[in-house]
Image (cartoon, helix red, strand yellow):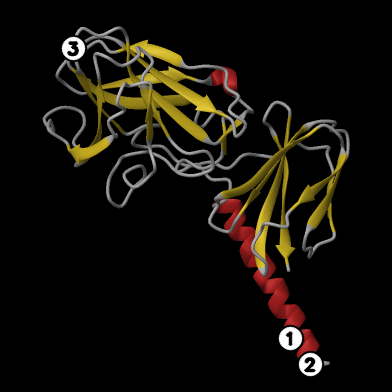
Amino acid sequence: MLKVTQQKFYLTCTFLALTFIFNHVAFAQNAPIDFEPSGFGATWNWTTFENDTNPQLQIIANPDVSGINTSSSVAKFTALQSGQPFAGCETMHGAGIGSFTIDSSNMMVKIMVWKTTISDIGIKLVRFDNWSLGEIKIPNTKIQEWEELTFDFSGHIGLTYDQLVIFPDFATRTSNNVILFDNIFGQGFVTNNPEKISGNYVKLFPNPTHNSLSVNIEDVEGGAVIVSNILGKVVLQQKFSSNQFTLDISQLITNSTYSVSILDTQGKLIETKLIVVN
């Protein structure tokens, strides 16, 4: 009897510890993106697109620490003359910046830029299924010095995203342009966690489970389910169009714990729960 009680106590403590981890990691926004070795952004997998040969985003020493940006490291994007006006770079879905919901604490997205020409800079936030409201564009007003720009995403409040897209030089070019950017979301940014929508009840069973997971949701007829591992990496995502459906989890690693997050059709978080795959 004592051994069984100890096992139950151990499992309870483990579950509570994992709940804490998932609440602070799986749905956390990794910001500010400062490209410092001990910060966020420098080691992320950035993909460049529509830039002809697509030279990689570079992390370099800040060449101009005399102005408002005294950071040691910054990102360098070379916009090729032969590239598209909307050439840019993006983070991976479910990695890097993590999953986050726009609210009053992060709706004003700041970025520091250093450019040699005047042109639009664009920022786009993308949902796990590649849906987006499109980019917001603002032109820089200074050249060859650091400038901080602020993008108003207040129209996105309540929406949950897991990808960041940057368009450093949204313009037709007559030459190759070098753009430096840094401190995305602002130097003083404090991370936030999304609040779940009240009034909905989510049931996952069986739990622990093995090959499949049944999902029942009250008052929701469609949306998406996102499964993340203990590091916050998305390992499975699927749309649903009914309040009762079955999720195939046969490809997940056994003897592991995962978070299952349910989002509605607008990308708003309904609830996040833990499951054990045995």
* Residue plotted at (36% across, 23% down): 88
> Percent x, y for residue 235?
61, 50
Q: Nearer the viewer, residue 150 or 205?
A: 205
Provide the residue designation for mark 1. Answer: 6
Earlier along the polypeptide chain: callout 2 or callout 3? 2
Which quadrant of the figure has residue 58? top left
Where disc 1 sits, the SS reads helix
For the residues labelled 2 and 3, say whether their Cβ atoms are less than 8 Å apart: no
* Residue plotted at (29% across, 34% down): 57
In whole angstroms, how far apart are the C-alphas of marks 2 and 3? 75 Å
Would residue 125 appear left or right of 211 to someone viewing this image?
A: left
Q: Amino acid at mark 2?
A: Leu
Query: Of circles 2 and 3, which is in front?
Result: 3
Q: Nearer the viewer, residue 97 or 79?
A: 79
> Percent x, y for residue 37?
27, 50
| Quarter occupied by the C terminus | bottom right
For the residues labelled 1 and 2, say whether their Cβ atoms are less than 8 Å apart: yes
Provide the residue designation for mark 2. Answer: 2
Residue placed furthest toward the bottom: 2
Where disc 3 sits, the SS reads loop
Where disc 2 sits, the SS reads helix
